[in-house]
Image: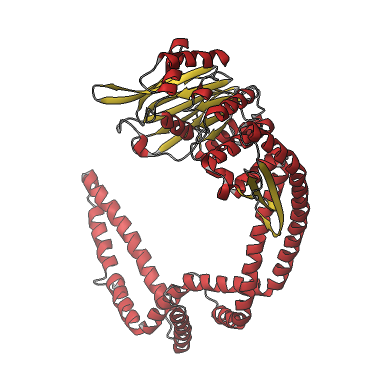
Amino acid sequence: MLKSLRIKNYALIDELEVSFKETLTTITGETGAGKSILMGAFSLALGRRADLNRIKKKGDKCIVEADFDIGRYQLESLFEESGLDYFNDTIIRREILPSGKSRAFVNDTPVTLNILNTMGSRLIDLHSQFENQKVTNPDFQVQILDTIASNNELLRVYKKIYKDYVCLQKELISLKDFQANADREHEYNKFLFNELDSIKICEGLQEELESEYEKLSNIEHIETCLSEASKNLDNEDFGAINILRNLRGAIEKLVDYGKTFEDIKTRLDSILIDLDDISGEIHNLFGDLEASPERLRNIDNQLQKIYGLQRKHRTQSVEKLLSIKKQLKERIEKTDNIFSDISKCEKALKIREEELTRLSEEIHKSRVKQVPIVQSKIEILLRNLGMLNVRFKIYIEKQDAFLPNGIDNVAFLFSANKGSDFGPVGKIASGGEKSRIMFALKTIFSEYTHLPTIIFDEIDSGISGEVAKKMATLMVQMAKKIQVIVITHLPQIAVKGQEQFKVFKQVIDNDTDTKIKLLDTQERIHEIAEMLDGKDISQSAIRHAEELLQQS
């Protein structure tokens, strides 16, 4: 059950906190006082879309926090699936930061909005002002029937297999499309692959060939330069090595005269070692130099093939050619294996079809079995709500194709008057009739679910008088099983609450603040009388309010 709700900096609310009892609670207030703001706060706490415009003071964050006692509702598995620690006393918190960023927490642990939404749907059934339109929605109609038929586990398995089935269908279409194109492209792809494979390219090959080509193309120039370098290093008269050796000999005679001379000698030793190494390398390079016109032609041919393939495939790197070669190989292998892949996919699809057929038939039978029970219950409830000649029919039609929730199209049909034909609820029911149908469905729904709390926001729209009394009585009965919170504009319903809150606006220093107050007996009498008679309350309205409260 919902123990309390705390709201800070939301819409017209500076800050408020309200506690709820386990039974029936009614909330009243003038039009525009802020009752819808409460519903918006509930929606926010349960994971619905956040709106930055709902922050009252733009520089501060908005907080909505709901405290639940969930010890009796077997929700441990839900927490485990969400990776959360379970506590009987669970607090859900939603924050909207001034930046517009939204955050959600369960027992101070950050969670995603998907987790919050899932958890919220298991804690509260939130019936907003526009929820009555859902009664015309086929998905909602199927959901009601499945809940009453206890089809949740069957549907969970069905939906998992259906998801695989849809993926396999898409994969099969893709494979067959690929096959149609591949038959035309296969030989050409093999030609392109063999062309790339024939030149035996690898990473770094192009740079290596280009370097060798440059060397062989300029061998005479390289020989001339190496000869000049060798002479400048090794000549006995003016070669750098001999000059440095003489210099080192002169400095060596001075080492006894100070550390500076020793350091210079050490540096000269190091330079001589390097020059000897360089001289050796130059001699080795001379030995390796060999003019080879044939090798030059071979390298040129290989480079021209690489350049030609690069132009053909519109790239400038061997690495990209290797990537293209890999892709071609994969396409060739895929084409070679396409018949096997299609066969495997078709077999997997057939298995899924058989599983879906079995499950959908089981779901269908379960739904059909519940139809007369649900029809009878709805008709009884609607007659209790003043629709004496009502007839209600649930129409189920099997489809040839699998649907996300089975093979059935479900339609709620309705006739309000004697002699009138059945028609879809969405087309022939008035606003007040939709309210009563939705309330009847919610009443039945509450018998079959383990939801802790249901909140109605003006479910009484379009009704009044005796019908309102009967709806109020049904709410009291519902509240014996689950916690019921009702936002209402009807005195007949307001008086039935074990507690009654009033939502009102307060203006202080040109700032409007929405407040909520738990009414005592005298305040309830005054509020009910005002709902009966308007602002100018008569004594008869006071007496009538007292009578209504005594009767409740």
Q: Residue furthest front?
A: 419
Which percent across, then down, holds residue 441?
63, 37
Q: Residue at x 67, y 28 (%)?
A: 74
Q: Residue at point 54% right, 79% down? A: 196
Expressed as whole percent of the image width and height from the top left, the position of residue 166 reads: 65, 58
- 313 lies left or right of 181: left
Measured along the vertical axis of the image, is residue 6 above or below residue 330? above
Q: Where residue 55 appears, x then y in whole percent?
A: 35, 33
Q: Quadrant of residue 270?
A: bottom left
Left or right of 513, for residue 360: right
* Quadrant holding the N terminus: top right
In which quarter of the view is residue 449 placed? Answer: top right
Residue in the image at 34% along x and 79% along y = 222
Q: Position of residue 180 (x, y in %)?
A: 63, 77
Is residue 306 positioned above or below 543 on the image? Answer: below
Name the residue nearer the viewer: 454 or 93.
Answer: 454
Compared with 262, 493 (above or below) is: above
